[in-house]
Amino acid sequence: MTGNEIREKFLEYFERQGHTRVRSSLLLPANDPTLLFANAGMNQFKDTFLGLEKRDYVRACSSQKCLRAGGKHNDLDEVGKTARHQTFFEMLGNFSFGDYFKREAIQYAWDFLTGSQDEGKLGLDPSRLWFTVFGGDDEVPADDEAAALWEEVSAKPERILRFGRDDNFWQMAETGPCGPNSEINYYLGEHPEDPNFNRADLVNGPGDTTMEIWNLVFMQYNRVEVEPGKYKLEPLPKPSVDTGLGLERTAVILQGKFSNYDTDLIRPIVDFTARLAGRNYDPETPEGFAMRVIADHARATAFSIADGILPGNEGRNYVLRKIMRRAIYHGQHALQLVGPYFFFKVTDFVVDLMGSTYPELEASREFIKRIVRIEEQRFGATLTRGLQVLDALLSPLPKGSMPPYRELARLYDTFGLPRDLIRVILQERGYKVDETEFNLGFNDALLQIQIHQAATGSKPQGFAKVKPVYQRFVDRKCEFTGYDETRTEGALIFGLIKGDQTVCKLNQGDEGEIILNRTPFYPEAGGQVGDTGVLVSANGAHLTVHDTFSPLSGLIVHRVTVDRGQLVHQEIPPQWGQSLAEVKVIAETYPFPEFVTAQVDVEKRDATRRNHTATHLVHAALREVLGGHVKQAGSVVAPSYLRFDFTHYQPMTDDEIKEVERLVNEQILRNVKVETDIMPVEDAIRAGAMALFGEKYSGMMRVLTVPGFSKELCGGTHVRATGDIGVFKITSDESIASGVRRIRAVTGFDAYERFREDELLIDQVASSLRTSRAELPAVVGKLQDELKKARREA
């Protein structure tokens, strides 16, 4: 059974069980600074499990692209050495958000694994399966329920093992959802009926003959901090399920292999690398190890670049650069793939192999090749420089002495000089290299460097937390009315916030935050800045809104100053206020219902709308002029300007900038109606809508279309017709990272002011040189020639 068939069988099986198939999120985590990369299937559902986001389904299944090469989950240095470790892999998962729990999760897993292949299942031999459950500790009792449920589905009692917290208890962080988990292990050996081979001590034990394939996590507790350093577990009101089945490991079983690298998901890449090197693949040789490293790292590289992660010097970009340079080094050092570049050919083969399953690879093929070639060129220069520094560092040291691990680690960290190469050079020059001391000393020095980098803010750390005061309003969904109006009357106050506390009133001069049941104010999202304006209460209080943001899905917070008057508010039960009828009941029931009229600053909103729609036109124009590899990598949409970051490998030429401006202004002059549709995100993407990097999409989404030119997922506010933009002008083009460029532009009145300023400058220069506008270039050129001549004579 091929890897593609296994993936599809899994997804189809859980669709039959009422699960919604959800596409893999990007490797670039959406709105989550706590992760370098998506490293598990549950990442995209994190806010749903935390109760901060509600979806229109309670069961889901997915095949998630994962990358583990940094942070808590870092398998980079083990890649190629073992049969299982990879940086890039696919995780199959089924999820329940407060719907089913342990019983159904265990029944589904048993049925899918052991059921007949003719019925769309895997048909595994139960005698090869082992099951682990949480054995309990001082804080959490043993998970006897899970053990009993495994017996209920026909697992033999002697095959159900109990382990401690390290193996069978899952938690996201020090606080938050957590719970016991149950792992399924599979015996790969040749003697499944012989207890001397297929035995319990190999589960979570030595060797690779018994491997974990599926992890069922039962989130049933919330771990809260009751005082500094002390925690307690509270039962979750809606326990949930999160599972992960490794696709590559499952392919090992169903294809009769022993190593992930021998499955049809990876072996073709290994063989392609072997052909490039003119060698046969032998897994027991250093060359075979290098081929495995290159194959894994080529997958990680191709998918990362396609998902908008590019090699750089900080954070996830730095990790990708390290992955790429490790592969390039092994190709050059072990396989003698020197001279013409090779790694871009391997990543291109990855696109051939996996592009039909993941169309984003095919769409980014040329861009992936270009970025990888550029990095190969740079690494050649960097490697030369790193070796020079290493030579200068070692030359004063006497033979047989201990090498300075901290400085060696800096060479690895700064120049990407592989530790394998450092070790070989030390041995060749006669320096003392005890393998244990080298690894301990090198890793300790590298850890200290990374701790320093984290402390100085060069790498993400910690978990992003939503302030508890906002979590109180998690069930308060605020209706955004701003697509149709800029003034909303009769908006009910759900809450007043001052500092980190809810309050009953805000007095004149106070700064605070207000949550309403309906508002025309757009919260900062998708690059668009939050709206500003005023709130006026029924009793005459007047407040200025300085900013609007959304700390939780569906919750809109207005940051305000009370200019005059006073707001008094009585907290209303969360089940009230979701409809106009309920608002009327509140007005009759509660003594202090406070209603306000919310008025957006229309001039700023209109300017922001012009710039936001213009970013969509710019995106489409850049893709037409520069190529399909162009994807948005960030944006800012403000009233006075727009900033658009995009993937591209070189500066735009004057002609390219001119053509982009022409295309955008051509669409503006067409004055076509901007169409907005609301549809499921999967349908929108199938219809050709662009999804933007770093954004999270789920359920029903707004799709903005400029007919015949642009179609994107977007929840922002936009003009009704392209002609409302007025005019568009690019003001700058600059590089902000390797393979990422940034343009700034203006529209409408700001573009008009820009043209007016240019006119004044030209007129002033022409007047000072006593010439006409038409002759200005010739006069300036003549003056430059005269100046050069005078300088030569001087």
Image: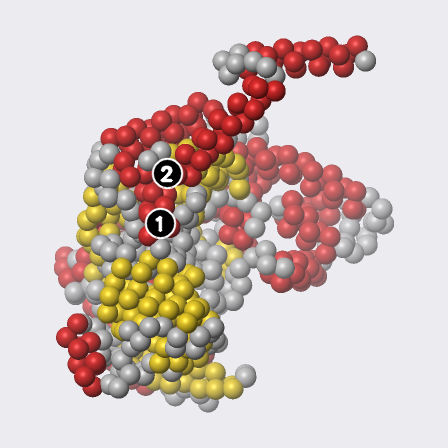
Q: Residue at the location (19% across, 49% down)?
A: 677
Q: What element carries label 2?
A: helix
Q: Residue 329 at x, y = what percent?
A: 58, 41
Please state the total of marks drawn on the protein image: 2
Residue 603's tag is: 1
Q: Residue 484 at x, y = what percent?
A: 22, 54
Q: Is mark 1 on a helix, strand or loop?
A: helix
Q: Quadrant of residue 157?
A: bottom left
Q: Residue at the location (39% across, 68% down)?
A: 543
Give whichever of discs 1 and 2 has the lower sequence position: 1
Name the amino acid, label 1. Glu
Say which of 709 and 236 sits in front.
709
> Crowding at label 2, few (<14), some or many (≥20) Cα neighbours within 10 Å?
many
Q: Residue 406 at x, y = what percent?
A: 72, 56
Q: Residue at the location (59% across, 59% down)?
A: 457
Q: Name the residue under label 2.
A: 748
Give the colouring mode of the picture: secondary structure
Q: Indicate whether 226 appears above or below 683.
A: below
Q: In which quarter of the image is residue 439?
A: bottom right
Q: Indicate whether 606 appears above or below 57.
A: above
Q: Residue 660 at x, y = what percent?
A: 38, 29
- In screen coordinates, is 99 left or right of 442? left
Looking at the rendered image, the disc whose residue lies closer to the viewer, 1 or 2, is 1
Residue 217: tell me if it is visible: no
Name the amino acid, label 2. Gly
